[in-house]
Image (cartoon, rainbow, N blue to C red):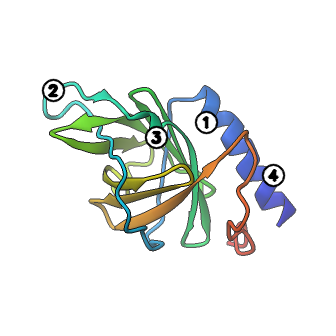
């Protein structure tokens, strides 16, 4: 478990310096039902430029799915997603047609998390519905590079 936590902490450090992100997991955690704000992003397909993501969406977000850790980082209009399985995705996040959206392209060509609509975001939780097989996921905000309490890590790194 310590190795998994150290690996996730390393991923958080890398996300602060990187524009890449990824995800290849097909399991989905449940999403929160409260909607406080949303953000959208455009990977360039629509020809319009997204507005910057809301301040509430900015930061590092953690989740687990399919026994893998997920790290989603949003900085201004940039978004990145990393998994402990090695998937790296990058793209954009921001307001698009009145909704907050995340658009990602993964280096391994994974389509699991390419377009996500933010269902809700609060001080500690982010709920995203991905158009790919990931479906709805809930992320927990990582503060100061530390793992949040209650994050299930026991099964990480066992595959």
Question: Looking at the picture, how far across and down is residue 124, in whole percent?
Answer: 57, 53
C-alpha separation, residue under disc 1 versus residue under disc 3: 18 Å
Q: Is residue 42 visible?
A: no
Specify which label sits upstream in the sequence, 4 or 2: 4
Which of the two marks, 4 or 2, is nearer to us in this view?
Answer: 2
Q: Residue 99 or 129: which is nearer the viewer? A: 99
**Of 42 and 38, which appears nearest the observer?**
38
Mark number for residue 48? 2
Residue density around tag 1, few if under 14, some if 14–19, many if 20 or more, within 10 Å: many
Residue 116 placed where, x, y %?
Answer: 32, 52
Dot 2 or dot 3: first in sequence order is 2
Residue 47 vs 41, above or below: the answer is: above
The picture places residue 152, in percent across and down from the top left corner, at 68, 71
**Residue 51 higher or lower than 150, as above or below:** above
Mark 1 vs 2: CB contact within 8 A: no
Q: Residue at x 34, y 57 (%)?
A: 35
Q: Residue at x 49, y 36 (%)?
A: 58
Would you name the residue on which mark 1 appears? 15
Circle number at residue 56: 3
**Does label 1 or label 2 sit earlier along the sequence?**
1
Report the residue at 38% width, 28% height from top. 77
Whole-number angstrom distance, CA of label 4 to CA of label 1: 14 Å
Q: Residues within 10 Å of mark 4 (few under 14, many from 20)?
A: few
* Mark with earlier residue (1, 3): 1
C-alpha span from label 1 to label 2: 26 Å
Say which quadrant the N terminus sits in.
Answer: bottom right
Earlier-in-chain disc, 4 versus 1: 4
Task: Work out how far the residue at label 4 is from the one at label 2, CA to CA, in angstroms.
Answer: 39 Å
């Amino acid at each position: 478990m310590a190795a998994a936590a150290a690996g996730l902490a390393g991923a958080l450090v890398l996300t602060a310096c990187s524009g890449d992100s990824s995800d290849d997991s097909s399991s989905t955690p449940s999403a929160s039902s409260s909607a406080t704000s949303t953000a959208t992003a455009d990977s360039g397909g629509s020809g319009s430029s997204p507005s910057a993501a809301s301040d509430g969406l900015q930061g590092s977000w953690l989740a687990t799915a399919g026994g893998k850790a997920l790290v989603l980082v949003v900085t201004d209009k940039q978004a990145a997603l990393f998994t402990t399985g090695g998937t790296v995705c990058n793209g954009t996040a921001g307001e698009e047609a009145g909704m907050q959206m995340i658009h990602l392209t993964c280096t391994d060509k994974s389509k699991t998390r390419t377009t996500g609509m933010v269902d809700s975001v609060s001080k500690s939780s982010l709920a995203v519905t991905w158009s790919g097989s990931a479906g709805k996921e809930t992320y927990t905000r990582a503060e100061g590079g530390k793992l949040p309490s209650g994050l299930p890590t026991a099964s990480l790194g066992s595959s």
